[in-house]
Amino acid sequence: MNDAFVDDELSLPKATVQKMVSEMLPEDLTFTKETRDLLIECCVEFIHLVSSEANEICEKESKKTIAAEHIIKALENLEFKEYISEVLEVAAEHKEQQKNREKKGSKFEQSGVSRDELLRQQEELLSRARERFQNQNSMNQPVAASTSPSEGSDIKQEVKKEEDSVA
């Protein structure tokens, strides 16, 4: 695999980092692209370090998803305790946003039709399907012997017309 491709994939958006740093620095200070790239490398390394530690904690607890508490414990273990209060704040904001997020209802809830009405509609559909099935079966039964050859032919033509109209 191409190392440049892997590096780009595991990086942070340069424009976003540039904007954040520019907002934090006094107006009379600037920083070079090389400095920005070094900062991005450090940030990516920090993210890897914390996520690896959080993943180990998660695995020890036999969990499959890294949660906020795993990140907090990882920060404690790695002695980055000064970040914990901000992580707790962001986690609380996220939790609140999830509560307030518009919940997707089921198709049943979105239909606005009562359960009884849906059952009635279902029974009606099943009844119509049953009738069609029975009509098709009765048309497929052999024609009874007739007294004249033309009478049997007429019945066969009627059945053929009905079959064509059903199809």
Image: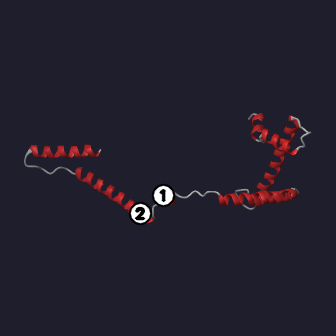
Rendered location of residue 78, percent (x, y): 86, 56
Residue 4 placement (x, y as % from top left):
78, 34
- Asked whether 156 or 26 is in front, the reply is 26
Q: Secondary structure at mark 2?
A: helix
The residue most toward the left is 147
Residue 126: mark? none
Q: Is residue 150 left or right of residue 95?
A: left
The residue under the point 15% across, 51% down is 144
Q: Amino acid at mark 1?
A: Ser
Q: Quadrant of residue 82?
A: bottom right
Residue 81 visible to the viewer = yes
Q: Position of residue 24 (x, y in %)?
A: 86, 45
* Mark 1 residue element: helix
Residue 59 can be seen, yes or no: no
Residue type beneath disc 2: Glu
Q: Which mark is residue 111?
A: 1
Quarter placement of the N terminus: top right
The residue at the far right in this view is 28
N-term mark: 1 or 2: 1
Say left or right for 98 vs 10: left
Q: How many callouts does the rendering have?
A: 2
- Which residue matches tag 2? 117
